[in-house]
Image: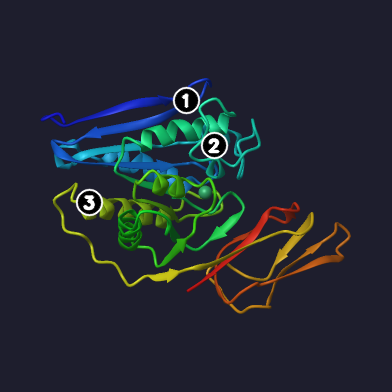
Amino acid sequence: MADIGRKIRDYLTVPGTDVVLPLTRVDGIMAGPTLLVTAGVHGGEYAPIEAAIRFASALEAERIKGQVLVVHLTNPLSFFAKSQYVVPRDGKNLNRVFPGVANGTVSERIAFAISRLASTADYWVDMHAGDIHEALVPFVIFSDQGDPRVVSRSKAMAQIYGIDYILQSAAIGGGTYAAGARMGIPSILAEAGQLAQVDEGAVTTHLRGLENVLRYLEMVAEKLDSVSQSHILHQFAWVDSPATGLFYRSIQAGDVVRVGVVAGVVRNPFGDIIEEIRVPQDGVVLFVVTSLAINAGEPLFAVASP
Ligand SMILES: [Zn+2]
């Protein structure tokens, strides 16, 4: 560790592709842990990207113990294509292909390059939001699988991020936080923001969360901010559309709903109902799709409960 702090702007190259990822490296003035922060794994999730840019810009090496790595834009291919969910070049969801493949498709190679970077870190915060057509209430996910010490540190990071809903999950296959946990790196995936907006409230939520993670890891001198009691959720039901058509939702993000309630209907272009979608369990609606157009197999909404 350098005895004089420094901040470097760099690009992480993704071998075998033309993709380069904007990266800020901050070496603090004293030894300490390495924190990796990633944003824009989904390119249409703007509030986290803006939060990463501001967080990196404001970091001062002089006040940091250890090292902070910020990848501002993890998925520039989706970002500049304004593509929801998938990387247009290979049709893959980047957050389903971690830890990636060295000689795979472009998404798998990006995931592999990020996983290699993560392997140099001690902690990982991956910031997300509702995608371009997703309304979302903020929540944080961590994996409850694997080394109990990793699980407990991931849980502690989730609890101090300042978001009420915390999802303790067996992990979505191929997600960043699950890959991090499997590498023995305490990791969280924090969701705040929605609908392709650079929403100031959501940007602030992420910035406060990141600052409190630095405090929790004792990478800065300031005392941990106390946060209000969070709700830990374990049961997570994700509902995909059974049909292609027009989706008319009757639930909102943040609604507390009961099992069996109609969440929405899918109509054909003549206006006839072709599917009625019901809530599969009691819980809170974490996100719901807002686009009228829906394809069979695409996510409609998710409900989580204790
Ligand atoms: Zn996302």
Pinpoint residue 21: horizontal percent, then vertical percent: 44, 29
Q: Provide the secondary structure element on which disc 3 rests.
A: loop
- Residue 217's mark? 3
First in sequence: mark 2 or mark 1? 1
Q: Amino acid at mark 1?
A: Val
Between residue 47 and residue 306, name the one nearer to us. Answer: 306
Q: Amino acid at mark 3?
A: Leu
Q: Provide the secondary structure element on which disc 1 rests.
A: loop
CA neighbours of label 3 inside 10 A, class few (<14), some (14 to 19), many (20+): some
Q: In the picture, residue 85 is in which quadrant?
A: top right
- Residue 14's mark? 1
Which residue is identified by label 2?
79
CA neighbours of label 1 inside 10 A, class few (<14), some (14 to 19), many (20+): some
- Residue 96's mark? none
Alpha carbon of mark 2 to alpha carbon of mark 3: how far?
Answer: 31 Å
CA neighbours of label 2 inside 10 A, class few (<14), some (14 to 19), many (20+): many
